[in-house]
Image (cartoon, helix red, strand yellow):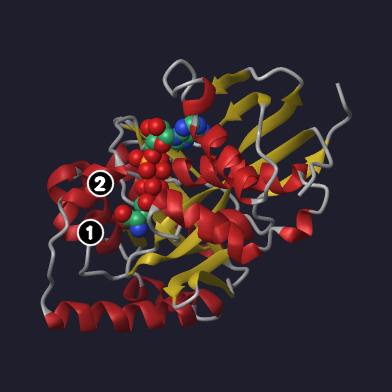
Amino acid sequence: MRLGADHVLVRVPATSANLGPGFDAMGLALGLYDEIEVQLVASDEVRVDVAGEGAGEVPGGADHLVVRALQHTLELAGAPLTGVHLRCTNRIPHGRGLGSSAAAVVSGIVAARGLLADPQALDARTMLGVATEFEGHPDNAAPALRGGATLAWSGADGPRAVDLEVDPRIRATVLVPDVRLATSRARGVLPGHVPHADAAFTAGRAALLVEALARRPELLLDATEDRLHQEYRAGVMAGTAELVRSLRAAGLAATVSGAGPTVLVLTTADAGPELESALRDLLGDPRGGAGWHVGHPAIDTSGTTCRSLPHE
Ligand SMILES: Nc1ncnc2c1ncn2[C@@H]1O[C@H](COP(=O)(O)OP(=O)(O)OP(=O)(O)O)[C@@H](O)[C@H]1O
Ligand SMILES: N[C@@H](CCO)C(=O)O
């Protein structure tokens, strides 16, 4: 396949996976974005400039995660990459449970699609499949690609996803700690087996969550209960576990965001005063404190977007 454009700008949202009981399956796109400008160059140089999150930390050149996903996707499409210049403006914090690695992978895939002469040749399922190969599970990649809330699974023909309805009254709040935790570490403490009763409990809650998200937000507290991962992870994110417990005791639907350590709270717009009061009690200030930053991102409904820029 031929390349069409040589210069594109991709915008990719943060995502919060699991939402409590939807381990490795459910996710929500949040209005906090990384932007990546991808410019093909005539030489075989691979250059990556990073501003914001990860600057001076993430590998440059061909090892950079966005470059790896871009290169892999272009190869798959039969249009191998030679030289490229990336300018990344990163706002999604790394290793916090807000889908930074999925955002990097998805942005590389969507950039590759935008560079092809026939972008339609790379369909949504193929893109989710490639992202899942990199990530190992599709729950962040699906909402990053599609926006909104999604339910993803691996079927006989590979990873798939559907959109979930989200009641317009629902609001997301994130409590992001200063400390990081690698997803690999948070997965490493999960057991190989769980009691049948816990699996049954969590399956029921995940089904209820679909209804709570769509039109019954008053059920969010019950619907976000989980027994598959959060308690097992408490030992590697004690502060997160404590905050989730306290917020839930105050009647707020708090969960560990992705593999943590960020806390996600789902409320309705009219629950602002309860949330503010709980945050003041727990952190000393509703805007954040004690090493926690409070954000109120919109729920993103666009997913990852890509537009061509003029040839430079
Ligand atoms: N924009 C980026 N560019 C390059 N590498 C990135 C970028 N974002 C994340 N990474 C890599 O991914 C790592 C973080 O991935 P990890 O899966 O541990 O956490 P996360 O994706 O932020 O959280 P979660 O998967 O729980 O939502 C970073 O340390 C970095 O190596
Ligand atoms: N479902 C994943 C999300 C983080 O990538 C987990 O909880 O480990």
Circle 1 sits in a helix, a strand or a loop, which is it? helix
Which residue carries the number 1 mark? 230
Describe residue 126's horizontal placement relative to residue 101 as left or right: right
Q: Which quadrant holds the C terminus? A: top right
Q: Residue at x 80, y 45 (%)?
A: 2
- Amino acid carrying mark 1 in the image: Gln
The answer to which quarter of the image holds residue 74 is top right
Residue sitting nearer the eye, 80 or 97: 80
Q: Residues within 10 Å of mark 1 (few under 14, many from 20)?
A: many
- Amino acid carrying mark 2 in the image: Thr
Circle 2 sits in a helix, a strand or a loop, which is it? helix
Describe residue 219's horizontal placement relative to residue 170 as left or right: left
Q: How many marks?
A: 2
Q: Residue at x 60, y 39 (%)?
A: 70
Ligand 2 appears in which quadrant?
bottom left
**Pointer 1 residue Cβ closer than 8 Å to ligand 2:** no
Q: Residue at x 56, y 51 (%)?
A: 30
Describe residue 274's horizontal placement relative to residue 228 as left or right: right
Which residue carries the number 2 mark? 240
* Image spot of residue 81 (x, y percent): 66, 34
Q: Residue at x 66, y 59 (%)?
A: 301
Residue sitting nearer the eye, 113 or 272: 113
* Image spot of residue 220 (x, y percent): 41, 72
Kindly tell me whether residue 134 is visible in this rendering. Answer: yes
